[in-house]
Image (cartoon, rainbow, N blue to C red):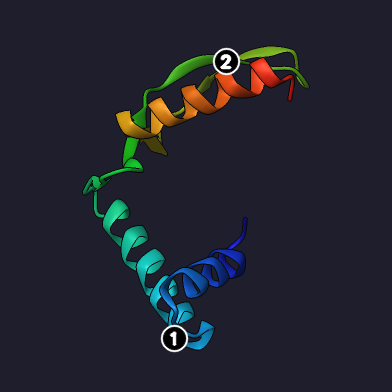
């Protein structure tokens, strides 16, 4: 699902027009991005939490030059699913396995 499809679903569910919903979704994603970059964790009840994670420097291997290398410290986005979402996923997956999907 992309942002436009999400906006269509929200517009349909809320009874608002697409013209009203798109700026709200754009603002939401802009604020979320700025908040995460500021180092603040975002918690969304039934979805989960988003935060920046520091990835420590580590040893790696360059397959092109065939030499060991050091991968520098970096930041990455971390998403942790809420317990309620994890339960829903487990139920959905067990039903898919049983039905053969």
Quadrant of the rendered image containing residue 87: top left
Question: Cα distance, mark 2 to mark 1?
Answer: 48 Å
Q: Quadrant of the N terminus?
A: bottom right
Q: Which mark is residue 20?
A: 1
Mark 1 residue element: helix
Q: Is residue 72 visible?
A: yes
Residue at screen point 37% across, 23% down = 56
| Residue 98 x %, y % | 65, 15
Whether residue 96 sits left or right of residue 86 in the image: it is right
Whether residue 24 sits left or right of residue 95 in the image: it is left
Q: Which mark is residue 52?
A: none
Q: Residues within 10 Å of mark 1 (few under 14, many from 20)?
A: few
Residue at screen point 61% across, 65% down = 5
Residue at screen point 48% across, 24% down = 91
Q: Is residue 95 above or below residue 44?
A: above
Q: Which residue is mark 2?
A: 60
Residue at screen point 57% across, 15% down = 60
| Residue 74 x %, y % | 41, 35
| Residue 21 x %, y % | 45, 79
Q: Is residue 61 above or below residue 37?
A: above
Q: Is residue 34 above or below residue 76?
A: below
| Residue 76 x %, y % | 42, 38
Which of the two marks, 2 or 1, is nearer to us in this view? 1
């Amino acid at each position: 699902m992309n942002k436009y499809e999400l906006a269509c679903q929200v517009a349909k569910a809320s009874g608002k027009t697409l013209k009203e919903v798109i700026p709200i979704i754009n603002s939401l994603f802009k604020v979320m991005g700025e908040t995460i970059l500021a180092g603040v964790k975002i918690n969304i009840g039934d979805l989960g939490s988003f935060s920046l994670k520091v990835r420590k420097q580590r040893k790696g291997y360059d397959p092109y030059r065939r030499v060991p290398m050091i991968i520098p410290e970096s930041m990455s986005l971390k998403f942790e699913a809420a317990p309620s979402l994890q339960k829903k996923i487990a139920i959905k997956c067990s039903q898919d396995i049983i039905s053969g999907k």
